[in-house]
Image: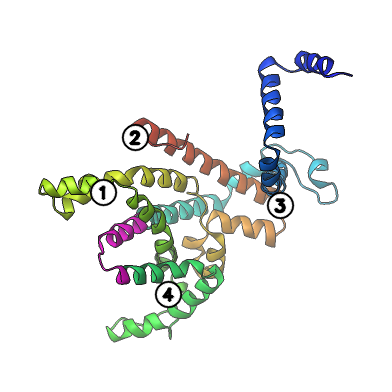
């Protein structure tokens, strides 16, 4: 069968615009086959580990039976979602997740920006590099080690209590006090990521035209006015894009650290959606129910991301798409 006949058959089956896209893609693959060959491992990685497992989300709408598999298990519709919304845990874990995320965004998101702005004003390069190195290092410590440090430092005989006891503060095991859990969780996150998060803002600051600062100095603008009228506006597009991306993870409170730090005495304020999914899915082997809760979590994240992007597009010139 020659090429013209195949082309006519393809045109009769597919719409003309899709046929044109396939033709262009085929020609591009033939022309740049070396580049596509290099990209192939990365594409296969995402297909195998990210897109193919997404078929498993269908068990959120099924009564999953391991012996029947994902596709053989019977459909039950939205039963798991309804049970989750009616459960005692729904209000608690949703509130805890949103509160911890709110603290992380309000306090944790500006922290790297402030550090980057402060480092940008430092003229002593040795001091600047020392501060950068010290603040970057916690990022490379694993969550397990960080959690171990937190547990050791916050015990009754730990370092923090030793210091505070000098000031007359009574000793207590902070991790057993539910009122302290969120502060410890968010504070340790900021300590671990503030230096790493400031890298991209420092890079953005180097992209601001230096002639603007020179012109401002000639006009008599001091450091503060330069910060307000040049530095912050120059940094704003980067801040907006990173904030939009951050909004896509509002419901993703890191379950590893929560699981390592929380206890039954702090469940009331520490239990979040991701830790709930872990308990239901891994410990109780209730895979369908855990998948339904995880699917709800991802759907809410997606809505937050789209909403933030839409608001940004409406009120600024920066947006993801």
The boundaries of the magenta stretch are 110-127
Where is 116 relative to 313, above or below? below
- For marks 2 and 4, give the CA distance: 43 Å
Where is mark 4, residue-wise?
174
3D distance between C-alphas at marks 1 and 2: 24 Å
Of the pair 260 and 276, the residue shown nearer to us: 260
Indicate yes or no whether the magenta region holds residue 249: no
Q: Earlier in the sequence, mark 1 or mark 2?
A: 1
Mark toward the viewer: 1 or 2: 1
Which residue is disc 3 drawn over?
287
Q: Which mark is residue 286?
A: none
Per the model, the C-alpha gap separating discs 1 and 3 is 56 Å
Whether residue 147 is visible to the viewer of this picture, yes or no, is: yes
- What count of labels does the image hold? 4
Camera-side residue of 67 and 150: 150
In the depicted structure, whether residue 218 falls above or below residue 192: above
Picture quadrant where residue 43 is located: top right
| Residue that label 1 marks | 210
Q: Earlier in the sequence, mark 3 or mark 4?
A: 4
> Residue at horizontal 38%, vertical 80%?
160
SS assignment at label 1: helix
Residues under numbered marks 2 and 4 in contact, where contact means CB atoms less than 8 Å apart = no
Asked whether, in this view, residue 218 is left or right of residue 94, the answer is: left
**Tag shown at residue 316:** 2
The residues tagged by marks 3 and 4 sit, at their Cα atoms, a distance apart of 34 Å
Circle 4: is it few (<14), some (14-19), or many (20+) Cα within 10 Å?
A: some
Earlier in the chain: of badge 2 and badge 4, it is 4
């Amino acid at each position: 069968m020659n090429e013209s006949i195949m082309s006519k058959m393809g045109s009769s089956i597919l719409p003309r615009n899709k046929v044109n896209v396939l033709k262009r893609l085929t020609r591009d693959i033939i022309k740049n086959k070396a580049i596509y060959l290099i990209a192939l491992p990365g594409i296969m990685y995402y297909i195998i580990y990210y897109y193919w497992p997404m078929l498993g989300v269908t068990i959120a709408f099924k009564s999953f039976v391991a012996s029947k598999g994902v596709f053989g298990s019977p459909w039950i519709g939205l039963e798991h979602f309804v049970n989750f919304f009616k459960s005692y845990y729904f209000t608690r874990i949703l509130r805890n997740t949103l509160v911890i995320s709110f603290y992380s965004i309000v306090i944790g998101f500006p922290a790297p920006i402030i550090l980057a702005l402060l480092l940008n004003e430092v003229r002593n390069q040795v001091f600047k590099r020392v501060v950068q190195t010290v603040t970057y290092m916690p990022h490379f410590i694993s969550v397990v080690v960080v959690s171990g440090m937190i547990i050791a430092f916050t015990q009754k005989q730990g370092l923090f209590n030793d210091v505070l006891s000098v000031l007359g503060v009574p000793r207590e095991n902070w991790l057993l006090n539910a009122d302290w859990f969120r502060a410890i969780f968010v504070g340790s996150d900021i300590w671990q990521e503030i230096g790493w998060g400031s890298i991209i803002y420092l890079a953005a600051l180097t992209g601001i035209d230096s002639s603007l600062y020179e012109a401002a100095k000639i006009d008599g603008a001091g450091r503060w006015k330069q910060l307000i009228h040049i530095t912050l506006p120059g940094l704003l597009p980067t801040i907006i894009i990173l904030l939009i991306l951050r909004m896509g993870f509002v419901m993703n409170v890191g379950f590893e650290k929560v699981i390592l730090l929380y206890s039954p005495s702090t469940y009331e304020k520490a239990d979040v959606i991701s830790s709930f999914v872990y308990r239901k899915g891994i410990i109780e082997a209730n895979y369908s129910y855990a998948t339904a809760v995880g699917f709800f979590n991802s759907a809410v994240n997606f809505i937050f991301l789209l909403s933030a992007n839409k608001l940004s597009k409406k009120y600024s010139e920066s947006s993801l798409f």
